[in-house]
Image (spheres, helix red, strand yellow):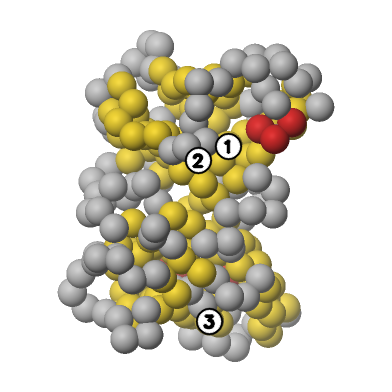
Amino acid sequence: EPEVTQTPSHQVTQMGQEVILRCVPISNHLYFYWYRQILGQKVEFLVSFYNNEISEKSEIFDDQFSVERPDGSNFTLKIRSTKLEDSAMYFCASITASEAFFGQGTRLTVV
Amino acid sequence: AQSVAQPEDQVNVAEGNPLTVKCTYSVSGNPYLFWYVQYPNRGLQFLLKYITGDNLVKGSYGFEAEFNKSQTSFHLKKPSALVSDSALYFCAVSYTLNDYKLSFGAGTTVTVRA
C-alpha cells in the first residue's frame, strides 16, 4: 500500500523558534493537505496545496504558517515563530480523486 | 458549518461480538462521509466512504457503514470484532466531492477484549 512519510516523528522546540515539518507524499499525487490535532481535540484542516500553491486555508493558518514543495517531492509546513498553542500532532495527507492517504504524523511540542 | 459528532468517547466490546461506532452529521447539502482508523503511532488509515448510491458501504478489514439520511447517521459496524480492531476511529464529512477538506469528529476509542 502506498505510504506518506513524515519527519520527524517528534519535535520539541522552544517558544519563538522556527520549525519545519516535512512530508514525502505519494509520487504522482498532486493534492496535499496539512491537518493538526491538538491533544484531546478534533483533527482540524489547516491548508490544501495544489499545483505549487495554496488552494485553501483555514483560519488557523495565519501568517506564522507557510507551506511549500521546494524540490518537487517533499512537502513542508513551516511555523515561523512557534507558540505554546501550536503544540499538536500534525498530519500530512496526499490526495487522489478517490482517497486521502495520511502520514503517521509529527508530534510538535513547544516549550 | 459542516460537522460530525461521535457521541461516544469509548466503546468496549468482547472479541467476537458485534461492534458499532456511532456518527451523526449536520445537514448541509449532500454529505460525503468517511471513516478513518488510527492505530498507535500510525497515521490515519482510510476504512470506507459514502459518496452516493447504496446506503450500505463495505470497507477494509470487514467494516461496513450505513448511511441513514432520515437519522443523519453513518454508523460504523463490524459483525464480529477482533482484538486487533482496538484503535481510535474517526468519522469525517465533506460537502464537496473530491475535496478532502474534511471535518472530523472527536474520535471514538474502541477496545476489544479477548
> Is residue B38 in view from this perspective?
yes
Q: Tags 3 and 2 in contact by the CB under 8 Å rule?
A: no
Residue B20: numbered disc:
3
Left of B77 or right of it: where is A96? left
Tell me: residue B45, above or below residue B111: above
| Mark 2 element type | strand
What is the crowding at mark 1: few (fewer than 14 residues within 10 Å), some, or many (at least 20)? many
Q: Residue A42 occupies which quadrant of the picture?
A: bottom right
The N terminus of chain A lies in which quarter of the figure? top left
Structural distance between the alpha carbons of marks 3 and 2 = 26 Å
The C terminus of chain A lies in which quarter of the figure? top right
Q: Label 2: which residue?
A: A35
Q: Residue sitting at 70 percent across and 48 percent down?
A: A39
Q: Which chain does the residue under circle 1 lie in?
A: A
| Mark 3 element type | strand
Q: Label 1: which residue?
A: A90
Q: Which chain does the residue under circle 2 lie in?
A: A
